[in-house]
Image (tube, helix red, strand yellow):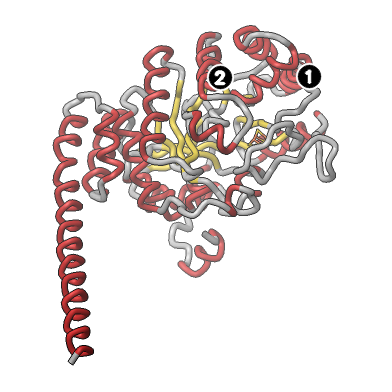
Amino acid sequence: MFSHEKLRTKIKIISRVLSCLFVANAFRDKIVLVMSSNIQPILDKALAGERLTAEDATALLESYDIAKMGAAAHEIRIRKNPSDVVTYIIDRNINYTNVCNVVCTFCAFYRRPGKPETYVHSIEEIEKRIDETIALGGTGVLMQGGLHPDFNIEWYENLLSTLHAKYPTFQLHCFSPPEIHNISLISKLDYETILHRLKAAGLNSMPGGGGEILDDEVRRRVSTKCTTQEWLDVMRAVHKVGLRSTATMMFGIGDNISHRVRHLQRVRDLQDETGGFSAFISWTFQRENTALGRKIKEEPTGIDYLKMVAVSRLFLDNVQHIQSSWLTQGLRLGQTALRFGADDMGSIMIEENVVSAAGANTEANEKELRYQISEAGFVPQQRDILYNYVNRENVDELDERKSMPLKQLSVAFAD
Ligand code: SF4
């Protein structure tokens, strides 16, 4: 009798739990539905040319209605840039040294000073890589390195002026705010003086490296390099001396949606002030071989990436170009981003050492990249670092074999 009573009570509890779960599921579905339907006024606002607020960006990043978001971002993208063209650049990443005197737990590239496997490329080695890049139709180089404890302003000036003298029209897109901050610590100079001198030595523009998440709550946990304010101050100085730069975001390093929105807000505010950012590029943390990768439980998904591309297009109304990061996301997702507000496919990356050390192993040559762009419904167009079109003879011949067998493609891309 007693055990029947107990059984009945258990059944009651289970059925209550089940009905609660049912209600919770229905409620959750409703919330998703409400959130989905709620983004339309935000998208309408963006399409009407009104500026989105941080709350709007948060609501979009929390929503799963990615089709609507992508369509609105694409609409804005075609208003800002020629609708049928997607650009790409042929350049090369040269990492002049892997010696670094700070620790970023998300980095698999750096080696501490004096440790085995450290290197510093000689100028002759760098020139050899530039010659190879030029032979492949490349127009510039993206050169960055670790924060070397001994390299002062003269070391960087010598590097740039030697290269600029030998390759006067080849674009030197080099360094990053943490490197400039490091020079300022070593040479005891302010950012603007450093950038004036580097510009005079041949610097053409600066990549937005070291942005990660522009919020010290996150930065302090993962890195001992420059703070949010220092990153922004270096970029302000870059733009003040008349150079352009890109802005970047690497998310998935323990950040949440609020941190990502604060990052976007800081980029937009500085762009209002200087107008010096040519493009915005986001990508997700690549975890392999990193200390942080062993700790992080939640990784951003493909949907998170596409939402970030779309939201950056919608929120950063003062930034002309949004780049797709096929290198970290794979060619297929990189191609899909072209329908979510991105108008540029980045670089064919003749050499890349930093994110590939952390597991991003996608490769593509110019032909493959052009194929992906045209199969997304756009005309591929080579550009230089400043987004000027570059027209090489006979480049169309690369497009002749458009129908590469699928099997061959999946082997070639290995994404
Ligand atoms: S991300 Fe840059 S600054 Fe940080 S450890 Fe790696 S090389 Fe050094």
Secondary structure state at the residue bearing disc 2: helix
For residue 227, what is the image quadrant? top right
Mark 1 or mark 2, which is nearer the start of the sequence?
Answer: 1
User: Furthest residue to the front?
Assistant: 2
Mark 1, other Cα within 10 Å: few <14 / some 14–19 / many ≥20:
few
Residues at marks 2 and 1, CA–CA distance in whole angstroms: 22 Å
Q: Are marks 2 and 1 in contact (CB under 8 Å)?
A: no
Quarter holding ligand 1: top right
Residue at numbered disc 2? 230
Q: Confirm or reject: label 2 Cβ below 8 Å from ligand 1.
A: no
Q: Residue at x 41, y 34 (%)?
A: 259
Residue 41 position (above or below residue 377): above
What count of labels does the image hold? 2
Residue type, label 2 = Glu
At label 1, which amino acid type do we have?
Trp
From the image, tell me which residue sits under label 1.
155
Residue 406 placement (x, y as % from top left): 46, 67
- The residue nearer to you, when weighing 150 against 137, is 150
